[in-house]
């Protein structure tokens, strides 16, 4: 399994856990206190951060692959033989 797949699955698990924790805080009434309110905001902030990351990963995975760049044409055999046969002149000093 690739590292991107592991990161994707980990992000999904954290996203679900954060939303479940936020729902539990609301359902149990613990979000009514100051501590519970800050815990609720922290859960929602973690869910938002991982949700944005998941949206970025999905959008990037849906992009089409870039077309391969055109490679330059190979030189003809005569041109390469000619360039190899003529050595560069030596500098005289």
Image (spheres, rainbow, N blue to C red):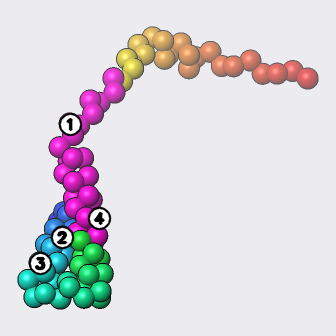
Q: Is residue 58 visible?
A: yes
Q: Local crowd at mark 4 within 10 Å, few (<14), some, or many (≥20)? A: few
Q: Earlier in the sequence, mark 3 or mark 1?
A: 3
Q: Earlier in the sequence, mark 4 or mark 1?
A: 4
- What is the distance, in whole Å, between disc 4 and disc 3 at their CAs? 17 Å
Q: Which residue is mark 2?
A: 15
Q: Local crowd at mark 2 within 10 Å, few (<14), some, or many (≥20)? A: many
Q: Which residue is mark 4?
A: 49
Q: Which residue is mark 1?
A: 64
Q: Which residues are magenta?
A: 45-70
The answer to whether the residues at label 1 and label 2 have Cβ atoms under 8 Å apart is: no
* Residue appearing at x 45%, y 11% in the figure: 78
Q: Which residue is mark 3?
A: 23
* Residue appearing at x 26%, y 81% in the figure: 37
Q: Image quadrant for the N terminus?
A: bottom left
In this view, the mark in front (4 or 1): 4
The answer to whether the residues at label 4 and label 2 have Cβ atoms under 8 Å apart is: no
Element under label 1?
loop
Numbered circle sitting on residue 50: none
């Amino acid at each position: 399994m690739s590292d991107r797949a592991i990161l994707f699955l980990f992000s999904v698990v954290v996203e679900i856990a954060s939303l479940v924790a936020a729902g539990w805080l609301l359902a149990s009434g613990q979000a009514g206190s100051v501590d519970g309110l800050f815990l609720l905001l922290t859960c929602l902030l973690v869910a938002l951060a991982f949700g944005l990351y998941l949206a970025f990963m999905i959008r990037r995975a849906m992009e089409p692959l870039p077309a391969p760049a055109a490679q330059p044409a190979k030189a003809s055999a005569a041109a390469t033989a000619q360039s190899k046969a003529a050595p560069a002149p030596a500098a005289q000093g």
